[in-house]
Amino acid sequence: MANLELKNVSKVYGAGVSQLTALNKVNFSAHEGETVLIVGPSGSGKTTFLTIAGGLQTPSTGEVLINGSGYSSTNKNEQSALRLNKIGFVLQAYNLVPFLTVAEQFELVDKVKQNNMSTERFEDVLDTLGIKDLLAKYPKELSGGQRQRVAIARALYADPEYILADEPTAALDTNRSLEVMSLFNQLAHKYQKAVIVVTHDQRLEEKADKVYQIIDGEMSLLKDQTE
Amino acid sequence: MFLAIKEIKHEKLRYALITGMIMLVSYLVFILSGLSSGLQTLNSAAIDTWGANAIVLNKDAQLSLPQSVVNGPDVKRATDAGGAKLVQFGSLVKDTAGHKESVQVVGIDQKEFIYKGLKVENGTTFKADNQVVVSDNLKVDGFKLGDTIKFANTNISAKIVGFTKNANLNIAPVIYTSIANAQKITERPGVVNGVVFKDAKPNVSDLRTSKVYAINDFINALPGNSAQTMTFNFMIGFLLVIILIVITIFLYILTIQKLPNFGVLKAQGVATKYLVKNTLFQSFLIAIIGVGIAVILTTITALVLPAQVPIFISASYVAVTAILIVVMSLLGSLIPIREIVKVDPYTMIGG
Ligand SMILES: Nc1ncnc2c1ncn2[C@@H]1O[C@H](COP(=O)(O)OP(=O)(O)OP(=O)(O)O)[C@@H](O)[C@H]1O
Ligand SMILES: [Mg+2]
């Protein structure tokens, strides 16, 4: 079973007087088929958590395990390949290449990676996300919500085991935010992905299976409906 | 090269502009180099047709053939070693129909290699003192086979019996005549200005007042020659640097604009190598298309230019310059590529 685990992970930025502990002995796990929300105020360590979980930064101490094996022991190219194959990022901005149409965003994934979603399954994703009519458009012709949905589709198309999203709803109004969050929830269950969403928006909590809170680098479990 | 091509298609205007810029500068480089070798040809083409590799001149003549006088014993030593005597001076000639032209008269000996190697395109070679073989450039000015020409300030005249190609010296057409006739026109009997050799290291020793020089040193010392070549080379070098800078600035700006996207692509696991390859490919494509069009334009220019314009476009020179321009463009993508390599996906995430 696919799972992502952080064991006793700390991240310290800087040294001496300017030293700052952004994450303090964090323990965390996410499994396939569940949506995990991480909430916390600004500067609490959410992005730091996400970049460490996604292998973009290494922890100062502790370890990140993907399906039981360590992450930090691998080199840069292996980490890049691991991200390509196992992790889909949905970020606040710049998810889409501006000079590619929506359809070409997926074509780009085909250029760099094999074993992407079958056409059949992907049609279904496009339906679920409601972006089938947007395939010929360029990102600048889309609304913020449409862009985020395309970004989610792009992440799903590569058929990763994990989806990591940083403030994916920051640019959206409340209704749109809830809609995107329930989409994540739906996708996690339907396609058996582990979806990890980082946000400062507490209204999203109701749509998640598990909710963690970070305050000043300390992580605690707020809610768990998976048991 | 998916990303590269999609981007160019989407940003047609930008890429058309930079390709146009490379095209124009390349065209300028080709035309300048054509002009440089064209003028060089006007200055020294005759020397090339002799097939000489060394020249004996008076030590004090500062490599100037008309100013050099080689003394009798030195001339004998040099010709004994296989050299060919030269008498050279500038003059003005007139034909009976009134055509006038300033020329370089070159006196050569009928028993020596310049005379023997003289390729007459039209008519025959000269066999007597009152006959001359002249540069075919004089045809353009109205001189014809069989014309009688008169040398200015003398009452010596001669008949044009043949035309020869590429006979230019000091930017003037050459008139070949016998040594004796040349000496008669200048009224300096017995004076030989120089002796040339096919051999780069002729076997002459004991020269008294003269010295053996390499033919290239002699050509470089032709009036204005090296200054002119240097000026052109400087301009061409400068244009190559301009291409380098223009491509660098262009790709740098475009890359900086795309950097956040590239950062996210790297986060998503797209290899840096893939992004670098696409950028290199773009600059290669811009250069190849720009240079390609410039080559076509240069060829057309060479075909339509009137014969009087001294442009000589050499295919091999154009090929070498074209490759240099492509290399410059690839070099121009290095700084933008460094930015792509440097961008840390982490910094592009969240805030
Ligand atoms: N590269 C860095 N160097 C030094 N300090 C950093 C660095 N990145 C983050 N920090 C600090 O670590 C702490 C946690 O930052 P982080 O970006 O994880 O917060 P966040 O929860 O994502 O905040 P926000 O909601 O504003 O995005 C902050 O105090 C921040 O200033
Ligand atoms: Mg953040």
Image: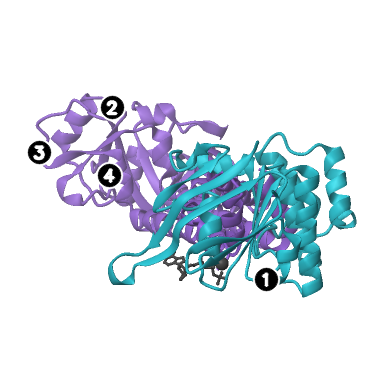
Let me know if residue B19 appears in the view. yes
Q: Nearer the viewer, residue B146 or B297?
A: B297
Position of B253 relative to B27 (above/below): below
Query: Mark 4 belongs to which subunit?
Result: B
- Packing grade of label 2 (10 A; few <14, some 14-19, many >=20) is some
- Image quadrant in which the N terminus of chain B is located: top right
**Alpha carbon distance from label 4 to label 2:** 15 Å
Where is residue B86? Give x, y as percent.
Answer: 31, 39
Tag 1 residue: A202
Please determine if labels 4 and 2 lie on a single subunit: yes
Q: Left or right: B19 with respect to A182?
A: left
Pointer 2 or 3: first along the chain: 2
**Alpha carbon distance from label 2 to label 3:** 20 Å
Q: Are marks 4 and 2 in contact (CB under 8 Å)?
A: no
Q: Nearer the viewer, residue B265 or B77?
A: B265
Residue at x 50%, y 60% (from the top left corner): A48
Colour displayed for chain A in the image of the structure: cyan
Please determine if labels 2 and 3 lie on a single subunit: yes
Query: Mark 3 belongs to which subunit?
Result: B
Where is residue B92? Give x, y as percent.
Answer: 44, 57
Q: Do the residues labelled 3 and 1 touch (CB within 8 Å)?
A: no
Q: Nearer the viewer, mark 3 or mark 4?
A: 4
Tag 2 residue: B199
Q: Ligand 1: does it lie within 8 Å of the C-beta at label 4?
A: no
Q: Which numbered disc covers residue B208?
A: 3
Amino acid type at mark 4 = Asp
Q: Which numbered disc covers residue A184?
A: none
Q: Which of B156 and B211 is in front in this view?
A: B211
Query: Mark 1 belongs to which subunit?
Result: A
Residue at x 68%, y 43% (from the top left corner): A160
Amino acid type at mark 3 = Arg
Tag 4 residue: B217
